[in-house]
Image (tube, rainbow, N blue to C red):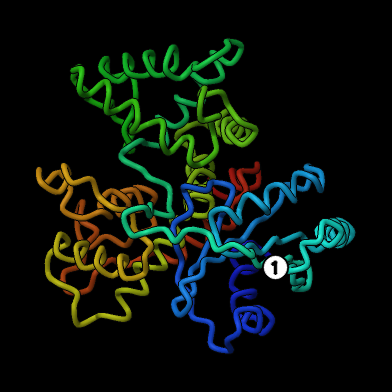
Amino acid sequence: MDKKLIVEKILQSEALAIAEKTKDLRVRRIATWDTPNIEYAYQNMESLDTIAFLFPDMNNSEENWIREALNVLSFYDSCITCFPAEALNEANYFCDCLIERKLESLHVIVLKMYMQSDTKSKKRSQSEQKSYWCWWRDASHYEVATLLELSEKYDDLEGDIYTNKVYPEFYEMMISEQTKQWDGTPRHKNYSKASFKAEKQNYKIPMCQLGFWDVPTGHLTAKGRVLLDVEKRNGDGSNVFLSYLSKIILLDGKHLDLIKDLDEFQKKCPELIPESSADFFILFDNYMETKNSIGTRKPTAVKTGAKKAYVRDEPKLWNKLGIIIPSGKNRYYWPFKGIKFNWQKINEILMSTGSQEDKDNNE
């Protein structure tokens, strides 16, 4: 059972409703990038209490699990710790350890540990919220592969290899048309100080948020090495590599959740869908704000008109991944209808593994 389904089942459970002293538990998803070890967090729309879901690393000790759970409670009002079904002994031991430490406010839900904090954590205001999904500007799958390869190239060096080695070489490749856009053609980039500074973050943020790199240094993580191995075996232009990367973006990057939010908005408010995409995304921003699921834009961006809507680049990415049904050549927005998703393609991506079998199926 995947984590998303586990979360949905817990939120629907009678036990959690009792713990919250209500049979009608209405929650909304809230941002989690400020607490990267938390994949899912929600807010009770009645009490405004926050609920975080923690999936412990099974390689850690119970001491680390307890420390992590207690740390979660400094950000959220309650924490539900979810253990896999095969870890019954560890889950019970974790429960026993908490009881021994006189944390008697613990409530156990099957294999999920529910813990109510005695001290309410500070409520995060709207201005403190950030988007819950991975930020992405325009990096192509070819460029992701290049960044992974450069990180491996300088892996033996200490310190911040992204700043000192990887990015300078990558930027030089961009301005000399040695990196590729989504369609495989060279990217055209003219050098400027502003461009050099901006692109450094544009490429680093998604690589770190998706867990391919160590944040302070840019060294490859175990996850980054797996993706690089898929690219080496199949090629940076292969459907296998693109599908594997797309799956990580959809699941780990939580873009699938954003897609579901957008699809829900379209279905709930079909009469409000405008003719222009610009107006559509402003309305979607407003919808996401009511759910407390969107980040706050920088005032400078609003004043300069650099970005009329918060959600802007994400649909462009989905279009490049091939999970949007186009309305015309180079167009993905349907006037008065919104965005049409290719759910069959999405399902195919979610079923992909990056294996040789996937390669054979795509040839």
Q: Is residue 78 above or below residue 110?
A: above
State the residue position of label 1. Answer: 114
On-image quarter of the N terminus: bottom right
Residue type of the residue flagged with mark 1: Tyr
Measured as percent of width and height from the top left, residue 298 is found at: 23, 45
> Looking at this rendering, what residue extends furthest in the left direction?
304
- Residue that appears at 24% across and 69% down: 338
The residue lying toward the viewer, choosing from 347 and 155, is 155
Q: Is residue 234 above or below residue 323?
A: above
The residue lying toward the viewer, choosing from 268 and 45, is 45
Q: Is residue 206 above or below residue 158?
A: below
- Residue that appears at 21% across and 51% down: 330
- Residue that appears at 29% across and 74% down: 266
Say which quarter of the image contains residue 101. Answer: bottom right
Residue 70 relative to residue 159: left or right: right
Residue 337 relative to residue 216: left or right: left
Q: Is residue 21 above or below residue 231?
A: below
Say which quarter of the image contains residue 351. Answer: bottom right
Say which quarter of the image contains residue 104. Answer: bottom right
The residue lying toward the viewer, choosing from 266 and 64, is 64
The residue lying toward the viewer, choosing from 48 and 85, is 48
